[in-house]
Image (cartoon, grey):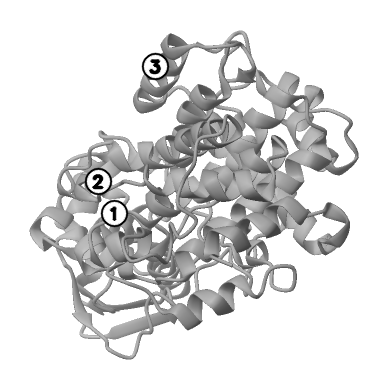
Amino acid sequence: MTAAQRLARFVAGLSLDTVPRRVVEQATLLALDTLGNGLAAAGDDFGRAALDVAERLGGAPESALLGRATRVAAANAVLANATLAHGLDFDDTREDAIVHTGCVAVTTALAVGEAVGASGRAMLEALIAGVEVMCRVGLAVPGALHARHFHPTAIAGGFGAVAAAGRLQRLSDAQLTHAFGIVGSQASGIIEYLADGSWTKRMHPGWSAHAGVVATLLARGGFTGPASVLEGEHGLYAAFAGGHDAARLDGLLGTFGTTWELAELTLKPYPCGSIAQPYMDCAARLRARDGISADAITAIRCRTSPGPVPRLWEPLAAKHTPPNGYAAKFSLPYLIAVILVKGRAGLAEFTDAAVRDRDVLRLASRVTYELDPTIDYPRQFVGDVEVTLADGRRLRERQDRPRGGPDAPLTRAEIEAKFRGNAGIALPAGRADAVIAAVSGLAAASSLKDLITALTSESHR
């Protein structure tokens, strides 16, 4: 069997009855976290643009748009909703694969689930299928997509969307295989947004989810795609990753049903690049432990592997003064400095006005880095920060994993608090509790009506 055929077999055969309870619980938390991230972005300029376009594209009124009363075709709903869910960089990450899963899997399962009248159980099965497929597609070539200037979520996302949408549309194994073959030819997503902080990365999950929904519709209608889409001579891995390790891919595909990648996800405490977050935690501990005043810091030196340098460190002069709030999310000098100066890094610290703060930029200019070959990136997202003080003291903190991952997970209370803060930006007072209740009860819900009703708001435009 080809890789796509093995993916199809897993998706078609998945049942919530065989998924461990802890994984189902994690799926509900992922859904809640993802929906909160999307709601928080609904009023942002990029969010309004995506929602406006989805409304103009229209189509059959089958799926809700986050933060709006409008319904559009499922493919157009995910174009907007997945863009919103990823747009604040507050969403989950699977470290080794460097993919963000919920923005694709949750939004696709919700939109297609509503369109087909699915139960909550079916939505959970679909989003679990989407996460498991998307992670394995990315894990087969760890670091290789970024190294060739592609965004891994953009490349792997379509496969996750096909898994979620195809599961809900009850595609056969053969149809799913064709859908995977079709979506592979729609894969795209370069990381040139790093040059100026423009918005294209935000769009990547939306486009991937849109492509996945369209691919399933085409496959259901009889359109064909190559079964060797991933591993073929002219396949996705050859084109986007420069090849792949066949044994690694075979091993990953052999773990379906025994290893659950969903349990390995990291949910973010900060709305910025996941690779940077251990550094931010290190800065926060230095600030709290030693009562450091930002004025007393003369230098900050960080240790990093070469992999993140083109995204978080270089060109260093530009990273010292990010041009806008979105670019600041991918500037480790800014991220470390804002923690040391303000003691926080929430959504308010990433507005265009906030990133011009003179005290933060002054300290950011003192941040440099050195390469550490012992950091096993991307298998490790390490933080290592050393500050030098005016009195000559040097203080150092190191963290080997991001907070929010399986080794140091956020609690349900923390995830619900994050959701309330995010959802409160878009929804009327008290509506967040209704969403939490609906998501928590998905496994027993006969339909998605309660969840959709709680998510949509006629007052937000």
Which residue is tagged 3? 53
Marks 2 and 1: in contact by CB < 8 Å?
yes
Residue drawn 48% across the image and 53% down it: 100
Q: Amino acid at mark 1?
A: Phe
Q: Is tag 3's residue or tag 2's residue first in the polypeptide sequence? A: 3
What residue did someone put label 1 on? 330
Classify 171 as above or below 370: above
State the quadrant of the N terminus: bottom right
Q: Residue 327: which disc?
A: 2
Residue 377 is situated, as x and y percent measured from the top left of the image, at 37, 78
Name the side, left or right, on which 57 lies relative to 265: left
Q: Secondary structure at mark 1?
A: loop
- Location of residue 273 by image quarter: bottom left
Q: Give the residue type at disc 2.
A: Ala
Left or right: residue 362 compared with residue 44 = left
Using the rendered view, name the quadrant where residue 108 is placed: top right
Q: Residue at x 40, y 19 (%)?
A: 48
**The residue tagged with tag 3: helix, strand or loop?**
helix
Q: Is residue 404 left or right of residue 323?
A: right
Q: Residues within 10 Å of mark 3 (few under 14, many from 20)?
A: some
Task: Identify the element where label 2 is drawn.
Answer: helix
Q: CA distance from mark 1 to mark 2?
A: 6 Å
- In this view, the residue in front, 394 or 313, is 313
Query: Which amino acid type is shown beneath numbered disc 3?
Result: Val
Report whether 149 appears left or right of 91. Answer: left
The label nearer to you, 3 versus 2, is 3
